[in-house]
C-alpha cells in the first residue's frame, strides 16, 4: 500500500535522504526510526506528496503520488510532527472543514465527527476555539482529522509527542484497530518502547540511509546474534546508529561526574 523506490532528496550539497526503498502492506504498522536529522520527516513528506524527490518514486496503493497527486492523496491521512491548526476555528469546525475538502457525505461526516470527538475526549470542548487548546489537545484534533474519512494509508510523524499517558495509550489502541481493518500505518517516533510494542516492522534511517528493516526479532538476530531475547529495540538502535560513540559519551560523562565528586 506504500512503496518507495530509490527515493532521494538533495538540498544543494546535502543529501537528506539517499536511495531509500521500502514497502508497507495492508494491515501493517511500520515504525520509522532514526536520530534527529536523519531524514525521517523528509521521507514522510515525500511519501505524502508534500515534497518532490530529487529522484526516485513514491506510490500509494499503486498510484504514483507525484504523477497523480490528487488521486493518491485522497487515500492518505497525515499527522505532521507539529499540530498546526487554524486558531480561529473550533475543533468541530476544523473537522467539518476537512470533511468538506474530502467531499464526505454530510450525515456520514457528522456521525464520524461525533465518534472521534467522543473517542478523544473532546466533546465537551468541541465548540471552543483551537487557540485555547493545549499542544496535546491540538494533537488529538489533528489525529481525528486524519482519521475522519478512514483513509487507506495513514502517515504519522511523532504522533504521541505532547500527549499525556492516557491519551498516548488511546492513540496506540486506535492505530492498532485501524491497521486491523486492512489499512497501512506508517509512523515515526523517538519513543522506542512504543515502536517495539506496536509495530509489525521497523525501519531505521541514519544520515539519510535506510540501514535496517524488519521485525524486532529479525533485527535482534541479525544485529546482535547470540544476544539475549531480552535485548531491546533501544539496544539495537544504539548499536546500529553509533553504539561505540554512545558508550564513549557515557564513559566521558561518568569520568566528569567522578571528578566533580572529588572536588
Image: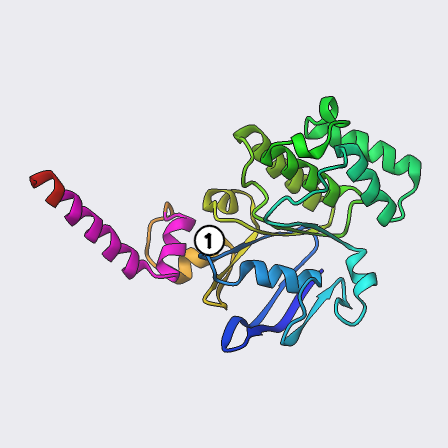
Determine the residue located farthest toward the front in the rendered image: 88
Q: Is residue 237 magenta?
A: yes
Look at 79% across and 62% down and name the residue there.
72
**Hey, which quadrant is residue 132 in on the image?**
top right
Q: Is residue 75 magenta?
A: no
Kindly indicate the quadrant of the structure image that contains residue 6.
bottom right
Give the residue number, with chain letter if any, for mark 1: 217
Which is nearer the eye, 179 or 59?
59
The quadrant in which the C terminus is found is top left
Residue depicted at 74% across the width and 27% down the height: 128
Taking the spot 20% from the left edge, 53% from the top edge, the residue there is 252
Furthest residue toward left: 262
* Image location (x, y in percent) of residue 20: 57, 70
In front of the other: 143 or 87: 87
Judged left or right of residue 65, residue 51 is: left
Along the line of sight, the residue nearer the viewer: 47 or 90: 90
Q: Residue 145's x, y, as percent?
A: 74, 42
**Residue 166 at x, y percent in the picture:** 56, 28
Looking at this view, name the residue that lies furthest to the top.
124
Image: 255 above or below 225:
above
Badge 1 crowding class, 10 Å Cα cut-off, few under 14, some 14 to 19, many 20 or more, is: some
Magenta stretch bounds: 231-258
Where is residue 55 shown, x and y percent of the image?
A: 63, 77
Amino acid at each position: 500500500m506504500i512503496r518507495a523506490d530509490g527515493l532521494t532528496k538533495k538540498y544543494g550539497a546535502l543529501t537528506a535522504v539517499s536511495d531509500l526503498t521500502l514497502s508497507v502492506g495492508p494491515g501493517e504498522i511500520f515504525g520509522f526510526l532514526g536520530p534527529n536529522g536523519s531524514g525521517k520527516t523528509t521521507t514522510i513528506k515525500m511519501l505524502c506528496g508534500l515534497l518532490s524527490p530529487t529522484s526516485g518514486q513514491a506510490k500509494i496503493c499503486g498510484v504514483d503520488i507525484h504523477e497523480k497527486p490528487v488521486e493518491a492523496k485522497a487515500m492518505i491521512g497525515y499527522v505532521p510532527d507539529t499540530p498546526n491548526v487554524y486558531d480561529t476555528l473550533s475543533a468541530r469546525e476544523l473537522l467539518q472543514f476537512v470533511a468538506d475538502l474530502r467531499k464526505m457525505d454530510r450525515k456520514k461526516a457528522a456521525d464520524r465527527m461525533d465518534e472521534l470527538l467522543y473517542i478523544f475526549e473532546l466533546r465537551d470542548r468541541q465548540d471552543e476555539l483551537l487557540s485555547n487548546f493545549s499542544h496535546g489537545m491540538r494533537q488529538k484534533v489533528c489525529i481525528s482529522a486524519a482519521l475522519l474519512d478512514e483513509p487507506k494509508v495513514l502517515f504519522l510523524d511523532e504522533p504521541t509527542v505532547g500527549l499525556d499517558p492516557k491519551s498516548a495509550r488511546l492513540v496506540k489502541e486506535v492505530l492498532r484497530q485501524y491497521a486491523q481493518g486492512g489499512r497501512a500505518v506508517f509512523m515515526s517516533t523517538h519513543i522506542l518502547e512504543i515502536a517495539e510494542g506496536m509495530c509489525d516492522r521497523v525501519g531505521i534511517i541514519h544520515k539519510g540511509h535506510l540501514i535496517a528493516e524488519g521485525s524486532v526479532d529479525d533485527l535482534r538476530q541479525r544485529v546482535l546474534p547470540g544476544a539475549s531475547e531480552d535485548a531491546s529495540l533501544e539496544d539495537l538502535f544504539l548499536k546500529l546508529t553509533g553504539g561505540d560513540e554512545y558508550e564513549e559519551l557515557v564513559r566521558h560523562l561518568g569520568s566528569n561526574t567522578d571528578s566533580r565528586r572529588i572536588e
